[in-house]
Amino acid sequence: MILIGIGSNLSGGGYKTSVDVCEAALSALADKGITVLRHSQWFESEPVPVSEQPWFINGVASVETPLSAVDLLSCLHEIEDSFGRIRRQRNEARILDLDLLAFGSDIIEIPNGPIVPHPRLHERAFVLLPLQEIAQDWRHPSTGRSIAALVGELSSGQNIRPLKPAGG
């Protein structure tokens, strides 16, 4: 299972809200030939680490692609760039953040390249809760821990809530 984390806490580039940005990112994946098999609902989450920047909209998508992990990560960066993402510093506010969370059961550590599974996915409620929604049987490729166990081990104080659907 190839998993991509999707997040935004800034609008712009013709998108009124971060939800619009995230929805457009799903379409951009498809435009690049990446098949979105399933995606979670959107969640609102406080920035990690906690800061004064706006809360994020986050979700996780399960995808299929003929691309290698390295090429997929490059494609994700191209999509971010096309949305106007500028990388200045770590953990800054951003219009779009696409993370390669897992690439099947592969464990990849390439110097100056991707680290898969994502090195902090097991610490982040904004990744694990959406992931649990779409892949209840998923296990961390490095540790073998179940998604339920990882969610149960999350540190307290991570503020996250499902986004209410329009009209809901």
Image (spheres, rainbow, N blue to C red):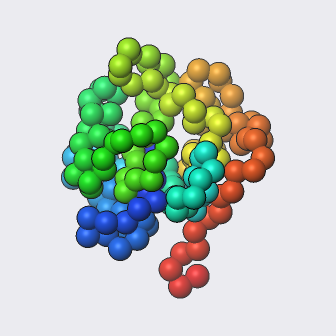
**Residue furthest out toward the bottom:** 167
Can see residue 42? no
- Indicate whether 36 appears above or below 105: below
In the rendered structure, the answer to whether residue 124 lies left or right of residue 97 reads: right
Quadrant in the rendering for residue 95: bottom left
In the rendered structure, the answer to whether residue 94 lies left or right of residue 105 reads: left
How many numbered discs, if any?
0
Quadrant in the rendering for residue 100: top left
Location of residue 61 in the rendering, given as x and y in whole percent from the top left corner: 45, 49
Residue at 58% over, 74% down: 164
In the rendered structure, the answer to whether residue 71 lies left or right of residue 7 reads: left
Can see residue 84? yes
Location of residue 146 in the rendering, given as x and y in whole percent from the top left corner: 68, 33
- Indicate whether 41 appears above or below 131: below
Quadrant in the rendering for residue 83: bottom left
Residue at 58% over, 82% down: 168
- Indicate whether 19 appears above or below 91: below
Residue at 57% over, 58% down: 52
Residue at 65% over, 63% down: 161
Location of residue 20 in the rendering, given as x and y in whole percent from the top left corner: 37, 68
Location of residue 23 in the rendering, given as x and y in whole percent from the top left corner: 37, 63
